[in-house]
Image: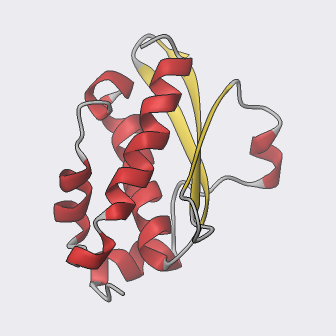
Amino acid sequence: MSTGSVVIDRFLTPAHAAADSDIDQWHIEAGQYTSGNGVWCWLLVQPVYAHSYRARFLAYGPPAVIAAADWLCERIERDGIDAAARIKPADVGVALDLAASERHIGILVIDALATAASNLGR
């Protein structure tokens, strides 16, 4: 398990975790599950105006999953869905300093993002 400060900080205080009240109000949802280990990430993305989005997540798994989902939501809100869609799983690993054994987490959150972008018609 990664114990890097970026992962721990985002895990303890995620800025983009979805609240129960968010879930029913979102128009675009995208989930991604891993087979066998019960780890999952669900992104909620909502257009605000042209090229601007709100993004929240629901996730289950080790701290790095929550940190990666929070990091990705931040990128969606800061850079837009099209720019975020160009992020690669390795970019997630580098940004969060994930251990080699956690690299699959980048794939998990990027797959959820790809589904969200597709649902938005991107």
User: Which residue is nearer to you in this view: 41 or 69?
Assistant: 41
Left or right? Give the position of 50 relative to 97.
Answer: right
Q: Specify the quadrant of the image occupied by residue 82.
A: top left
Residue appearing at x 52%, y 29% in the figure: 116
User: Which residue is nearer to you in this view: 105 or 94?
Assistant: 105
Q: Specify the quadrant of the image occupied by residue 46.
A: top right
- Whether 82 is drawn above or below 70: the answer is above
Residue 115 horizontal/vertical position (percent):
50, 30
Residue appearing at x 38%, y 62% in the figure: 105
- Whether 6 is drawn above or below 17: the answer is below
Residue 15 horizontal/vertical position (percent):
51, 59
Q: Specify the quadrant of the image occupied by residue 90.
A: bottom left
Residue 69 horizontal/vertical position (percent):
46, 56
Residue appearing at x 46%, y 24% in the figure: 117
Residue 42 horizontal/vertical position (percent):
60, 48
Q: Quadrant of the C terminus?
A: top left
